[in-house]
Amino acid sequence: MVVSTLLRSFSSKHEDPAATLPSSTTPLLYEPRPGELDLERRWPPKRAALVVIFGFLLLALFLAILIADLNSDVHANGNVSLATSGSSMASEPLKLVSRGVSAGVSEKANRVFACVNVVSFPWNNTMLSWQRTAYHFQPEKNWMNDPNGPMYYKGWYHFFYQYNPNGAVWGDIVWGHAVSKDLIHWLHLPLAMVADQWYDMNGVWTGSATILPDGQVIMLYTGSTNESVQVQNLAYPANLSDPLLINWVKYSGNPVLHPPPGIDSQDFRDPTTAWYTSDGKWNIAIGSKVNKTGITLIYSTEDFKNFELLDGVLYSFPGTGMWECVDFFPVSNTSIKGLDTSVKGPGVKHVIKTSLDQARNDYYAVGTYDEKAGKWVPDNTTIGLGLRYDYGMFYASKSFYDLHKGRRVLWGWIQESDSEIADVKKGWASVQSIPRTVLLDTKTGTNLLQWPVEEVDSLRLTSKVFDKVEVKAGSVVPLDVGTATQVDIVAEFELDKEALERTAQTNVEFSCSTSGGAAERGALGPFGLLVLADESLNEHTPVYFYIAKGTDGNLTTFFCADQTRSSEATDVDKKIYGSTIPVLKDEKLSVRLLVDHSIIESFAQGGRTCITSRVYPTKAIYGAARIFLFNNATEASVTSSLKIWQMNSAFIRPFRPEQDH
């Protein structure tokens, strides 16, 4: 049996206890002063009566408007109700509401505030409206999570996504659908699939597309049945001649796969794109777990209706828990071109990526795939799946091979990290990352390179160049670019070489997340950029490098993003994210930042390390947002050269048949 070969360790998964968000309504008390509005003494009885009646009518109208407004804010979906107290919301302790775990998926609520006494911030509409992005994909309203089934078909890029049509929190999941000619300017289409069958009644969950050589489009997805069992289902376009693929048909024989013996009914989800094998069949991978060992099951099929479970597992790793949204694809170690999912042979490595249910991060490794044995082995067996796509807010990613341009493109879900009350108030939650090209880093041979697709450059407007700006130790330098809410920044940094040589070796440990952030001064850092900063620097988000010189004299470079001072709000995540980054001989330190309102996507050293930040400033918004260079090192000065572009909006909107064909 498949599961008999796996390590069985520790206990079953922990589920966060459900809780409820606070609800309060504060009555407005008013008592007239003596003699005030004495109607009978000052006005004739008939006139006084008319005034009283009119007053009651106004009061009734006010109450009706207030109740309607509260209902629009309070009812997130049919099963959940949240309460706010008007436009600014009263300051109250926040409590965690668990979403998704009891249904059999990873936690979808923000867990930052679990077991922490946090007070809700009085957000106003001006602040909340600013948070909506200009060129990242998001629906017009409501909740969104995982990217699903991306593909290129008959001149259009298609993007499907997990969507709640009924509110701004997770639940009632169906498939949203949008199309684009360039991966940037998206057009919303009608829902692709809804929860209308017993086998997906509790959710049309994550899936992947496979385009067959004869042009057929196969969509496999996980459904949560009427009994909350996770099964795999087949769907296909109703009309292959329709380039928009608006209508989809669910196979009458669904479900095509049930959880195998030894696998829990809620630990069997997220089928991958299929790859073609040398025996003329198609293989797919599905994530699961046994106790706390994460595993990848492999199924073989000829027709996508009948499947055979292969012996063993593609790969497993103890202690990692449930594997969601598994991805498996080849990369070339000789070319900068992407590869179709079925490519194998000399000059090809394979990547396994998993989204870890427990950690809510995406981990990957580069390795070797043995098709005959049905096994994948990481190149670095010591760390296993030890690398991350992104060290910030980036989860449930999905890649696809873009035949149109010969590249592999990666999407990732960027979660919110504010309070659920604020999300319900603004009416939406979550966005998608800018699509990224994915290549093997042939210089290191150990990691991937991720970079924004070239089409995002089409949004660049005016630019400013800053050449060789010296930033002395302990200083901050403003960059005059005007407002900086939507910008694309490319920057290089050079440390003073003499300072590098004379800096003493140290055995002090450094970590982005635990070493005090950008305010913690060292001999060789931190230094970098302050973005979404107000003029007085009460709010700012540093994205920076830090160099540590070890006792052996070698340099270790860290790339970090510090959210601790990103906002004066009390109910937002203020973590520090980051990791070490390989810097090869004679390489300058380089970074690219895509700033788009409440999102900062950062790519260091050509995309070796990436960090996505969600920030929610209260002052550094609209025209008050600024950019600064900073150097908080104690010994070394830094020289920086930059180019900064203002970015246009992508004008994402509904599809208009009369003008968009």
Image (cartoon, grey):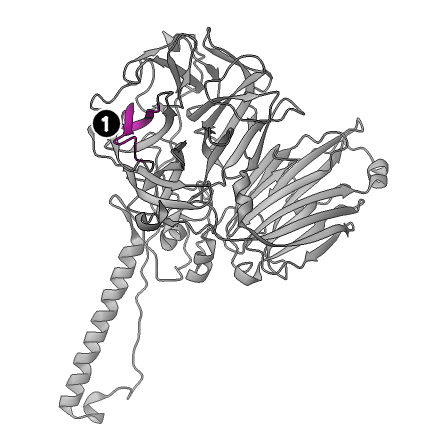
**Viewport quadrant of the C terminus:** top left
The answer to whether residue 85 is seen in the rendering is yes
The answer to whether residue 540 is seen in the rendering is no
Residue drawn at x 29%, y 86% is: 36
Residue drawn at x 71%, y 31% is: 583
- The verdict on residue 233 being magenta is yes
| Res. 557 image quadrant | top right
Q: How many neighbours does mark 1 have within 10 angstroms: few (below 14), some (14-19), or many (20 or more)?
A: many
Could you say where residue 427 lies in the image, as x and y percent from the top left? 36, 52
**Viewport quadrant of the N terminus:** top left
| Res. 32 image quadrant | bottom left
Residue corresponding to mark 1: 199
- Magenta stretch in the rendered image: 215-242
Q: Is 333 placed above or below 162 here?
A: above
Q: Nearer the viewer, residue 393 or 35?
A: 393
Q: Is 472 placed above or below 398 here?
A: below
Q: Is residue 300 left or right of residue 247?
A: right
Q: Is residue 499 left or right of residue 463?
A: right
Could you say where residue 564 lies in the image, as x and y percent from the top left? 58, 48
Give the amino acid at mark 1. Answer: Tyr
Q: Is 396 placed above or below 369 here?
A: below
Q: Nearer the viewer, residue 442 or 578?
A: 442
Could you say where residue 601 lies in the image, as x and y percent from the top left? 55, 43
